[in-house]
Amino acid sequence: MICKLINLFRPFFAALLALLALLFTLAAQNRNYPDKIRGYKVEPTVVEIKKPTANNSSTNKSQNTDKQNDGATPDDSDVDQLIQFGQPELARATPLGITFAVPIVVAPVTQKGHVDFLVFEDIVINGRSVEISDYNRSFDLPNKDSLTLKDPLRIYIFLPSALLAAIGEWTDSKDAWPVTGRVYVFGKFKKSILGISTSFKRCVPVELNLTMRNPLRAR
């Protein structure tokens, strides 16, 4: 009898889970941002990601590996996000924590733009909250292929337990670490109004929901 009830209501529960996932996605997309941050007007839709075609997506992926600064490619290559993370590397380990060097990968966009700096907020890696300093290096947005920035992001993760035990715990964890949080992209972006190209000073919020390969796992 119980099995029959479970089978009867299984489609209902599946639909309910799908609805909850949709509501969560819409809530993230409709997040309320302040009107201005550090003097930049916040405008989430000012940048449009250039979507690869089916014919050249694999070609672009191989070209990115050869042409970009350090050969890093984003771990979530299918994620439609302006800012992504490349393959992290262990930079330093101390009794208090570990530091990773993480390449920043910028997706190509349809219009021209110049980024002044990046600000990271509420970043959580593998279930642990991390503080990331502002990325104060300017760059132009790519228009053809994804761009790996020259200087990687340095992420410090505080581990309150003993060093060997902490690293062992993270080494034995899953192959990929979930990464969530927010990146604010500050810069000047061009728009065409009545055929006239104009540059606007804007802040573009990017919601992160991706995975990062575990650099501590033996391969």
Image (spheres, rainbow, N blue to C red):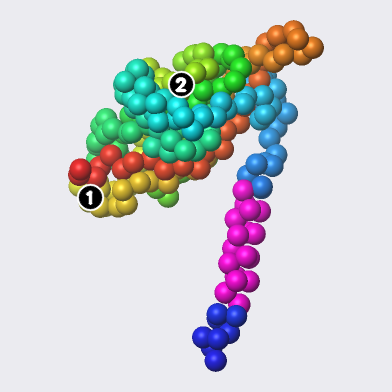
Q: Is residue 20 magenta?
A: yes
Q: State the count of labels.
A: 2
- The x and y percentages for residue 92 are 25, 32
What residue sits 68% from the left and 35% below the top?
33
- The x and y percentages for residue 40 are 67, 20
Please say if 82 is above or below 186.
Answer: below
Instruction: Provide the residue designation for mark 1.
Output: 168
- Furthest-top residue in view? 196
Quarter of the N terminus within the rendering: bottom right
Instruction: Provide the residue designation for mark 2.
Output: 145
* Extent of the magenta region: 9-25
Task: Tell me the amino acid under the disc marked 2.
Answer: Asp
Mark closer to the chain start, 1 or 2: 2
Q: Secondary structure at mark 2?
A: loop
Q: Does 219 sit left or right of 126 as displayed?
A: left
Please say if 211 is above or below 3.
Answer: above
Nearest to the observer: residue 208 or residue 147: 147
Nearest to the observer: residue 124 or residue 202: 202
Q: How far is mark 1 from mark 2, CA to CA? A: 37 Å
Please say if 144 is above or below 160.
Answer: above
Q: Are marks 1 and 2 in contact (CB under 8 Å)?
A: no
Residue 48 location, quadrant:
top right
- The x and y percentages for residue 130 are 43, 39
What residue sits 66% from the left and 30% below the top?
44
Q: Is residue 56 magenta?
A: no
Residue 41 location, quadrant:
top right
Within 10 angstroms of label 2, few (less than 14), some, or many (20 or more) residues?
many
Determine which of the numbered discs, if any, sits on residue 205 in the image.
Answer: none
Task: Tell me the amino acid under the disc marked 1.
Answer: Gly
What residue sits 20% from the left and 43% below the top?
219
